[in-house]
Image (tube, grey):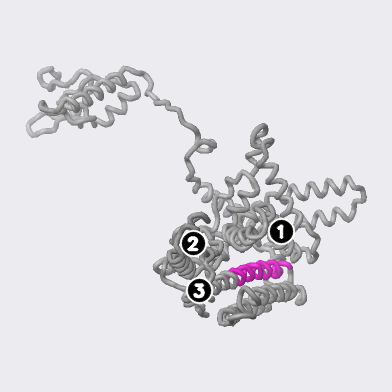
Amino acid sequence: MYPITHSEIPAASSTRPINMVPYRGEGSPERILRPRPVKPPIPSNLRAQEDYGFHLLPDPTVSGISSGRSTPLPPDAPPSEQSISSARKHARAQAKHRLFHTINYTPRVSHFDPSSDYRDFKGFFVLFWISLTIMVLTTFLRNIKDTGYPLRVQVWKLLSANVIQLAFSDGAMVLSTAVTLPLHKIFRSSARALRWRNGGIIIQSVYQCFWLALWVKWPFTLQWTWTAQVFFILHTLVLLMKMHSYAFYNGHLSESEKRLKSLDKPSDASLADVVKYPSSPTRQHNSTANGSAEMVEQEEKLEKLEKLREDLASELTSPLGITTYPKNMTLWNYCDFVLCPTLCYELEYPRTPKIQWLELFYKTLAVFGCIFLLTLISEEYIMPVLAESAGRLQHVTKLLDKGLILAETISMLLFPFMITFLLVFLVIFEYLLGAFAEITCFADRHFYSDWWNSSDWLEFSREWNIPVHHFLRRHVYFSSKTYFSNSIAMLITFLVSAFGHELIMGCITKKLRGYGFVAMMLQLPIVALQRSKLVRGSMPWLRGIKA
């Protein structure tokens, strides 16, 4: 063993350990130890250690010119930058002497707080689909364990029944709505008895009543299953609203056209203000507003006549200024309206440049996926509960026992019904209407609003089904306001909506029991209560009741 002298060891920092290795250079003894070269420390690692209170002595391998946090200021830097640099150095110096990292607390609310401006909750939508995926996999595994097959077939047989008859009947029903087009051409060309405001509106109304009675009776006559009946009745109501909007709006335009032509002979024409049809929210009128009665009386007759011509011409022109009545009276225009995801007819709609086929594929796939999930939930979580409760009710006689069974059944069905409601909402308003919007390049795809934030039933009814809300507002409420007060017009609107709900419930139960009608009309007193001072003032907790 050779002794090691201090002169043979290079100078090193006393704070850093020296790794000694044998030196095997040529002509040197093998057992002499030399220091291992050490990599210079990374400034970012040193900063991380300093932030957590681990302070190291200066290392001679690191330059002392910069701390690694900022670039040194030049000597001729302006005073403003020198002040900022000095403030940063002071803040870092203060942080080095703290044992714990500083946390900045500011006044702010959580994301779910009512006063929060945060509105991006798309993650919950993704979580909803993840939960349904887990439910499907769990159901598959349970069915394989019990029956050896992943799915049951009871509900599939119910859904697949009457498919051929349903397809042909639905096609015939769609074709029967096209009778409105030749009828309107007759009304437009007629000058007296069959004119729209005389006999045309009566003929169209009678045809719609007979049309509705025929197609409502049709599935009962063929004794379809309730699933086929519900689909058929829903499509019947949609086509009825489309046919009504097409006929009545074009009838109004035919009267405006006749009046515009009558102004060619001003001596015999009426100079009353233009009657503008109640417009859907997407329609934009570019004409000037009508003046007050006093201003109209002060205008000269010639100026009034010119203004009347402008208003009538604006009423006959589409909002986009391309299509003008009666150039829209074509079979292609009517077929396009039937396919468009809207219930209110307009001369023209905003369109997208082209069809996005990949988006159309995704939405079509989502439609069938939601139908599959609806079927799965029905056969796994709804039908077994109903079958079990029906058997238990047959073996009890006491009223209390029956009440307990009904309460238990309802409590077990609440969650499956809630998931069913959300899936029905998605398959109709997001995927099905979105697919038809993609097919027709329909640009306005605002089919629903944030109904989940509704604070009363009236707000919910406006926001969860915007196409139907637009139709009722345009063709029922505003049309009724012409002859009645606001409250009576609202009552008529709810009556029409209640009739439609009762019709759907009748297809499910095979009887008109009045459940849907009464439940719909009960919204009026509920809305009055929710908007009263009692609820909004002294009972604020009731304001959170959501539809």
Say whether residue 207 is visible: yes
Displayed quadrant of residue 488: bottom right
Instruction: Say few, some or many: other residues with alpha carbon within 10 Å of mark 1 (under 14 / 14 to 19 / 20 or more).
Output: some
Distance from Cα at disc 1 to Cα at disc 3: 45 Å
Q: Residue 20, relative to residue 296: is it above or below?
A: above
- Circle 1 sits in a helix, a strand or a loop, which is it? helix
The x, y position of residue 86, in whole percent, is: 22, 22
Q: Main secondary structure of the magenta part?
A: helix
Q: Mark 3 vs mark 2: which is more N-terminal?
A: 3
Distance from Cα at disc 3 to Cα at disc 2: 33 Å
The x, y position of residue 455, in whole percent, is: 61, 43
| Numbered range of the magenta stretch | 226-245
The x, y position of residue 260, in whole percent, is: 49, 73
Q: Mark 1 vs mark 3: which is more N-terminal?
A: 3
Q: What amino acid type should be assigned to the residue bearing mark 1?
A: Leu
Q: Residue at x 66, y 77 (%)?
A: 199
Left/right placement of residue 351 relative to residue 274 reads left
Q: What amino acid type should be assigned to the residue bearing mark 2?
A: Arg
Q: Mark 1 vs mark 2: which is more N-terminal?
A: 2
Displayed quadrant of residue 152: bottom right
Distance from Cα at disc 1 to Cα at disc 2: 26 Å
Q: What amino acid type should be assigned to the residue bearing mark 3?
A: Ser
What count of labels does the image hold?
A: 3
Which residue does the numbered mark 2 point to in the structure image?
283
Along the line of sight, which residue is nearer the eye, 154 or 17?
154
Which residue does the numbered mark 1 point to in the structure image?
495
Which residue does the numbered mark 3 point to in the structure image?
267
Q: Residue at x 74, y 70 (%)?
A: 225
Q: Residue at x 71, y 46 (%)?
A: 526
Q: In front of the other: label 3 or label 2?
A: 3
The x, y position of residue 484, in whole percent, is: 67, 57
